[in-house]
Image: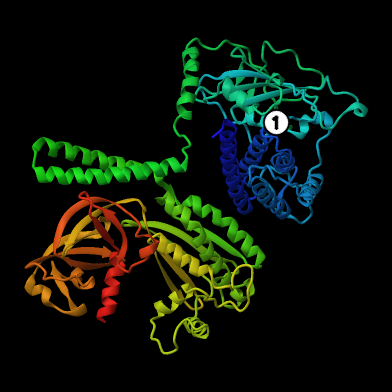
Amino acid sequence: MAVNDEMRTLFQEEVMENLAELDGALLELEHSPGDMDTVNRIFRAVHTIKGACDMFGLSTVVRLAHDLESLFDQVRTGWRCVGKALLDVSFAAKDRFSAMLANGGEDAVEDHELSARLKDLLKNPDLPGDEISAPESAPEAAAPSPPPAAAFAPAPASAPAPATGSGQTRTWRIRLAPSDPGHLGKSDPLALLDELRAMGELAVRCDLADVPDLALLSPQDCLLRFEALLAVGETAVVDANALRDVFCFLENPDDVSIEACDGCAVETSANVLGACPAAPPPVAAAVPSVPAGVPAAPPAAAKPAPASAAPAEAKKPQAAKKEAMQSLRVDAAKLDDLVNLVGELVIAQARLTQLASGLAHPALTSVAEEIERLSNELRDNTLGIRMLPIGTTFSRFRRLVRDLSSEMSKSIELVTEGGETELDKTVIEQLNDPLVHLLRNSIDHGIEPPAERLAAGKPETGTIVLSAEHAGGEVVLSILDDGRGMNPDRIRAKAEEKGLIASDVRLTESEIYNLVFLPGFSTAEKITNVSGRGVGMDVVKRSMDALRGKIDIQSTFGKGSRITIKLPLTLAIIDGLQIKAGEDQYIIPLSLVEECVELPRDEGTQAGRGRTIHLRGEIVPYIRLREAFELAGEPPAIEQVVVTRFEGERAGIAVDEVMGQQQTVIKSLGSYIGSIAGISGATINGDGTMSLILDVPTLVAAVRRAAA
């Protein structure tokens, strides 16, 4: 890949991350419109997108980002309240960014209507009656007037600068003099000063000497000259390189100068900087370094930094470098290749263990055991790298619920739980589409309109709870809504009407609910943008089968529904228990196994679904693997029963022999064989033979249905 292509790939990844951050922050701001930390997150995300696009010459995106950035700067400075118009145009701008940058921004086309909406809002700081609530720092007046030119204060802060603490501080002098024409159409110098303010205590002087008469003034040129003093605490990792990063998007690097000024005094009691001995006196038009209404502290006497500060400062660049090395970006394809190699290593290790066991050579056995230990650790660490919190997927759906509820004139709140639950990256990637279909189904068919909810004695706002938790070797996802629920009689009638089932077939309530997963099934009266074509839930079922997952529906008519999804933690490598029945070998996932017990022949003669064994006073039903798979031959005199636990119950599987535990590399059966009830995949043994991996819950349920 060429260097240019690599840079563009990194640019695309950075932009996508910031767009996701922007989307999430906008949703948070909608619920907490007075949270200035969220406002600042939005501002930083837009500013980063603008800077990155400017570096690649994407002027169309830069203009849109600049207007949105200016809009949120008005919120930060108290000129604007957070309202519906602001949020709507912000969401529209975020969607437009995504569309413009889908192909790296090469085909970006300006949306003139959206640009006009942004500019209208910029001209009207507060629209009457539009406020959700005013920011905490905003005055009570409906629309504060822009400050006069004489009182102009650059880079006003929405909150006091963080205190540097009682430790030794270091001071930097920064001079910013933008020189390129049209600078204000590119990067806002006040935004750059705000980034400095976030690093410590900042005092700013503004020189207006180069500003011409109004008739000669170009509104796109920045003729202001800023001089700032930045004091950072001893524990802050801020050096000259970190400061230069703030100004990395300037076209002319000479527009900024940065130098240490450790002789400058700090008046920590008032949280403002004192006068810098080496700085020139303020010009007549200089502005105070503190917001209006806050009394400035008198300048403190200059004093040199203690000698002990020098060694500590010398270590800061190393500390910054160490912090930057804590994480790195890795191509997902390389990670997939690593997992495949670990899988091949596991198979080779199993072969080595089998050879060592057969030869009974002490030295070889010792090496085989050591390699097995290292292989186990390497497998766990590699799979751990692939594990991601499922909350990264949950966050995408908040916007989906917001947009669909608005489109359908419904009031819906999405509650997420268990976002820290980790799942394999591959599983998470394939979960997006099925979860989208399930949420759209809950919003359209489940949650009622506000008037219908109030008439039923429910709150006007419906609630959808999306949760995740670990349960043994699985992750359990749940989508719960408090809507109208499912009517089993209507579902059956629709299935019969569409010819999906016969009218005389007997079905349990659970089986009736599962009819919604049949291709072509839909209870919608008309086709809309959301439902009615009968393909959504079919997609969900096929996706669950591909992930070796299970899906179940529970519902109470008039009260709501719960859809439960059970997924394996990983699709790559698991610990398994190798068993034998007849001449064939099988694998049971070790996460389901509780214990193994012997079954004498006289106890194994019970027939049908009545087979049980007694374990310490508890009766446990079991099935025989030979009968389930119709294997030829007679069972041994003493069989083994592998006791498993799943879905809250215990069940045994009678086998000829328990061969022992082994790492199992999961292989798909392929599209030619397809899905087989009771089998979830296959693996290659150390001797080159193949073992089928049992899907225990499905196998036990199938045997019980056949014996009923």
Residue bearing mark 1: 294
Q: Viewer-proximal residue, 95 or 694? A: 694
Q: Position of residue 623 (x, y in %)?
A: 20, 71
Q: Residue lying furthest right in this view?
A: 215
Q: Position of residue 75 (x, y in %)?
A: 71, 43
Q: Viewer-proximal residue, 273 or 482? A: 482
Could you say which quadrant of the image residue 398 lies in?
bottom right
Q: Residue at x 43, y 79 (%)?
A: 512
Where 505 sits versus 199, above or below?
Answer: below
Q: Residue at x 12, y 73 (%)?
A: 604
> Where the N terminus falls, by quadrant?
top right
Could you say which quadrant of the image residue 129 lies in?
bottom right
Q: Residue at x 60, y 37 (%)?
A: 8
Q: Residues within 10 Å of mark 1 (few under 14, many from 20)?
A: few
Secondary structure beneath dot 1 equals loop
Q: Viewer-proximal residue, 497 or 464? A: 497
Where 575 sits versus 242, above or below?
Answer: below
